[in-house]
Image: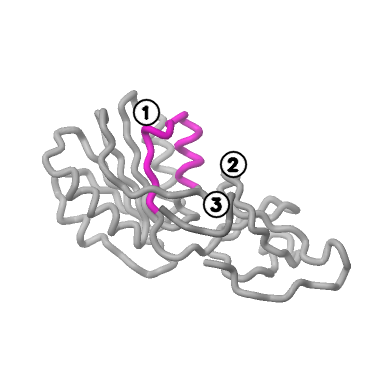
Amino acid sequence: MLITGIKSRPVYDRLQPLPGGTRHIIAGQGSGGRAMLRLLDDMVGQDRPITLLYSQESFSGQDFLAGLQQHPSHQLKVYASNQALIDDLNDLLFDARMGTRLYLAGSESFLGSAMQVATRFDLNRDEVLREHSGTLVRRVWCVHCDTYTENVTQRVYDCPGCGVTLVVRDHYSRRLAAFQAVKADAEVPGELPEAEELDT
């Protein structure tokens, strides 16, 4: 369980085999590969199909592809970017049937994006587990231009979409799968909050 001072931040799981699955999709990125490998060890003897999706894009630089390739009995798809994996996950879940179980492991940004897809296809809490891996760098959404920025570590930053100097709020929106950011000097023009590292 993740302990944090941000009440809106999701509480994550530890990946473990979910009962009743007729098909298992295990998706992860970067350091999430460690949790994927642990789950595969826990699923030894599983006679249901297992599909592995792994993105090598990682803020932490950790890569578990070699370990995942040691499980040749399972279909393994490898992606250069998290977005490519998310797009393919959308296609897989579009064709999914009752009994599909989804396991997610990786950064908060990756988990949030993947959960948006799972929610679109009405997967419920008994069908999805999420394990956070790595740092808690933030995915941030600009309220002014609708731009998402990945891996934000500073409280104040310039939006790459509209150029406005933003301040990151400590509110995580599950619908947006991101923290919200607003114009930093909205109350007093020209007066910016102190620059600081975010709690990651």
Residue at the spot x=19%, y=33% of the render? 48
Precedes in sequence: disc 3 or disc 1:
3
Which residue position holds label 2? 175
In the structure shown, which secondary structural element does the residue marked by tag 3 occupy?
Answer: loop
Q: Nearer the viewer, residue 136 or 119?
A: 136
Depth check, mark 2 against mark 3: the one in front is 3
- C-alpha separation, residue under disc 1 versus residue under disc 2: 23 Å
**Residue 126 position in % (x across, y down):** 37, 32
Which residue lies most toward the left here? Answer: 45
Does residue 100 appear to the left or right of 188 in the view shown? left
**Residue 86 position in % (x across, y down):** 43, 46
**Is residue 191 magenta-colored?**
no
Tag shown at residue 9: 3
Disc 3 marks a residue whose amino acid type is Arg
Magenta range: 113-131
Which residue position holds label 1? 95
Depth check, mark 1 against mark 2: the one in front is 2
Disc 1 marks a residue whose amino acid type is Asp
- Quarter of the image holding residue 160? bottom right
Precedes in sequence: disc 2 or disc 3:
3
